Amino acid sequence: NIVAFPTSLFLDAGGRMRVRRITHRGVNTTRLALVNDVSRKAERGEMTLEEAERALSDIASGYRAEQKTLIPGYALAAAGFALMFGGGLGSVVAAFVIGVLVQALQPLFSHMAMGVLFGNFTGGLVTAFLAHAAALALPYGDVNATIIGGIMPMLTGLLMTTAVRDTMYGDLVSGIVRALEALLLAASVALGVYIGLKLIAMTGGVVL
């Protein structure tokens, strides 16, 4: 019997129970696919228990995306969303540059207890502030498209989708917790954008 919550894991097998607290969460689809492959091979008898344990240990210690992959990925996503929301070439370039800076800041918060919230807040603030500051120094086009493009990669669509799935499958506690987490993350981005706009207004800039 396995009961999984976003913050803890309960496993009962053969009258013995293990409980593990989950302190760091994230989405790594590559690792998920590898774990599924190991479980299928073990179920079919293609791997011994020791081989499966070694494979899982290797998966747990590796397959983490590095900044050299995340930075261009985030920047390209931000630029793509800016284009999707009606931005021109200037907005796309601005969103790309801002995306590089925002993702470069994220490791500063990775070891904090509420690092994801602070990271999203800072990302929203930096995106809004730099988008308007760049427009004041060198008008490049649609500032709103740049801001939207810059914050879209931080929004938690997958997390909310998982919350709805868990709720539909009857895992009410997990669904509610995930939905609340998604709302908090979105609110932190929105608060960062709001403060960034206020800072621009306070420094004499005109919010476009």
Image: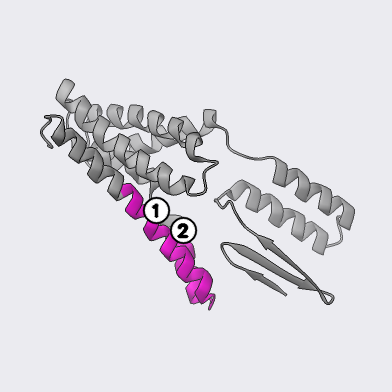
Q: Quadrant of residue 147?
A: top left
Residue 66 is left or right of residue 85, and the answer is: right
The C terminus - image quarter: top left
Identify the residue at horizontal 69%, vertical 61% (top origin): 20
Q: Which mark is nearer the camera, 2 or 1?
A: 1
Mark pair 2, 1: CA separation: 10 Å
- Local crowd at mark 1 within 10 Å, few (<14), some, or many (≥20)? many
Q: Is residue 183 among what the camera can see?
A: yes
Rendered position, 203 above or below 40: above
Q: Quadrant of residue 157?
A: bottom left
Residue 16's tag is none
Pinpoint residue 1: horizontal percent, then vertical percent. Answer: 73, 75
Residue 135 is left or right of residue 29, and the answer is: left
Instruction: Confirm or deny contact between disc 2 and disc 1 (CB under 8 A).
Output: yes
Magenta span has 177? yes
Magenta: main secondary structure: helix
Identify the residue at horizontal 24%, vertical 38% (top origin): 196
Rendered position, 110 above or below 174: above
Residue carrying label 2:
159
Q: Which residues are magenta?
A: 161-189
Q: Mark 2 belongs to which amino acid?
A: Leu
